[in-house]
Amino acid sequence: MRLNGAHVPAPVPALAVQGLRAGYGRGGDIVCGIDLAQTPETILAVIGPNGSGKSTFVKTLAGLVPARAGAIRITGTDVTERTPAQRAAAGLAYVPQEANVFRGMTVRENLKLATDFLHGRAGVCSAYEEKVLATFPEIVRREGVLAGNLSGGQRQMLAFACALLANPEVLLLDEPSAGLSPALVLEVMALVERVRAAGVTVLLVEQNVSAALAVADEAVVLVGGRIGRRAFARELAGADLGDLFLGRGS
Amino acid sequence: MLAQLLLNGLVTGLVLALPALALTLIFGILKFPNFAIGGMLTMGAYLAWVFNTLAGLPLLVATVLAAGSLALVAVLCDMAAFAHLRDRGAITLLVASIGLSFVLENICRFAFGNDARNFDIAVARPIRWQGLRVNHEQLVTVAAVLGCLALLYLLLRLTPLGRAMRAMADNASLAAVRGIDQTRVTRITWVIIGVLTALAGVLVGLDRAIDPLLGWNYQINMFAAAILGGLGSVLGAVVGALIIGVVEEVATLVLPINYRQAIAFLAIVLLLLFRPHGLFGRRAIRK
């Protein structure tokens, strides 16, 4: 990269994926060779039709589905062979689409668990925890409530708070708007923007394409387990979904 | 008469609470019904008997050594058998646990024969209180089990390890991505299972003779207790054990004593028919 004639080294991608293949059991590949690199402190939306492999892709990044081939790097560190817990310690946080809190435990216990096993991680300290929790006053007020008794929106906020308490480099979000009212979707997306502004790189898997493109910097369209198209989010914002998902006009 | 039966039933229930807790912890965290608990209980009793009678150590020291040894055996069993089958589903693990139970039981049979054994302890007169007859073994049982339950409660509620165990029971995938080392938590769970079943083996051995079928004879009762409370529920296992213990004892007023175990069978049948998730268990949702 050159800036005003001086050579500036390209930043190490916060998340880099090379030739990633993954699937379940003895079945065929669901993720069929994905390559991507994400610039730090950006939001990358992953969109695509149902069954395109979005959730499997993000679960493979989190370590819940083993990679059959390829490599995953977090800020330059290869985490492909690491367990989900080791990836969390390396700076990867993941908020699943459903069951994203421990429903049988209180809000306080959920928040404690977020850092119980990550105290060795840089930046995870009580001052940082206080700073994060100050942005979730509604959750903190319900500390004694069972997480399973929270509303869908409150559960989503709790899941975000838990993920952020780990001071992640990269935050993986699997359809955070699923099941929420339009007003709550706006609230969640505003929170995603705030997370990015705080210096976290966000990979946002979304079925709600317009909401995702409204906050993302870039987007990739996943079709049949492969990246069909990558573009700036604003370029895709007005595009027809059929064109995007079927690869017309790319 | 009834008060005496209630007292005996509560003590029987407290002894039953320990293996029922072990069963429910394994079911909650590793998601399979562990039939090896019976074999482990037998081995725990024999280990304590070896340290107490053959090595000549006081029963308290023998119990501690037996608990440590059985914890090691439990971890080794997990590493040798269950860890390799974890991805094969609950039925495979259940069958493996039945096999393991036979192995543990027959190791005891091979090493010590079929003769009944007893701990080397002083015989003491029972205490008479308010018309009730309370023997020393019952007092030891109440103190040991209540102490054990209190420690387990504190561990599960107040420590990061306890939170990790409950988190794994609640949602194992989420626990993994929150940085919880599942292998470590699983091993520590087996250590706790080993300690609980060894202590149960000693307490059962105080109440009756030690023989290779000691744990097997308790198997139905511990399953009935855990299912009654709701498999996976710690509180449920304790309450279920107390209910089974009391009902079994009180039932001897109307049933011949030989039919006592039928109560546990009946409890399982009725529960599976009318309340399969037990008193405190979560209702399973089939999609």
Image (spheres, coloured by chain):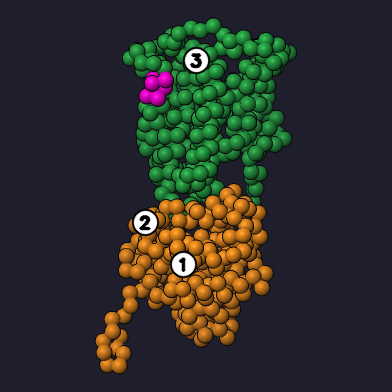
Chain colours: A orange, B green
Front in this rendered view, residue A204 or B71: B71
Q: What stretch is highlighted in magenta?
A: B60-65
- Residue at the (65%, 54%) spot, across then down: A149
Residues packed near mark 3 inside 10 Å, few (<14), some (14 to 19) or many (20 plus) = many
- Residue at the (68%, 32%) spot, across then down: B271
Q: Where is residue B78 in the image (x, y as percent from the top left)?
A: 40, 36
Q: Position of residue B95 (x, y in %)?
A: 49, 33
What is the distance, in whole Å, between disc 3 and disc 1 at their CAs? 56 Å
Q: Earlier in the sequence, mark 1 or mark 2?
A: 2
Q: Which amino acid does label 2 sit on?
A: Gly
Question: What label sits on residue A120 in the rendered view?
Answer: 2
A184 over B251 or under it: above or below: below
Q: Disc 3 sits on a residue from what chain?
A: B
What is the distance, in whole Å, between disc 3 and disc 2 at their CAs? 47 Å
B84 over A25 or under it: above or below: above
Q: In this figure, which residue is indicated by the disc labeled 1? A: A171
Q: Does the magenta stretch include residue B146?
A: no
Q: In this figure, which residue is indicated by the disc labeled 3? A: B206
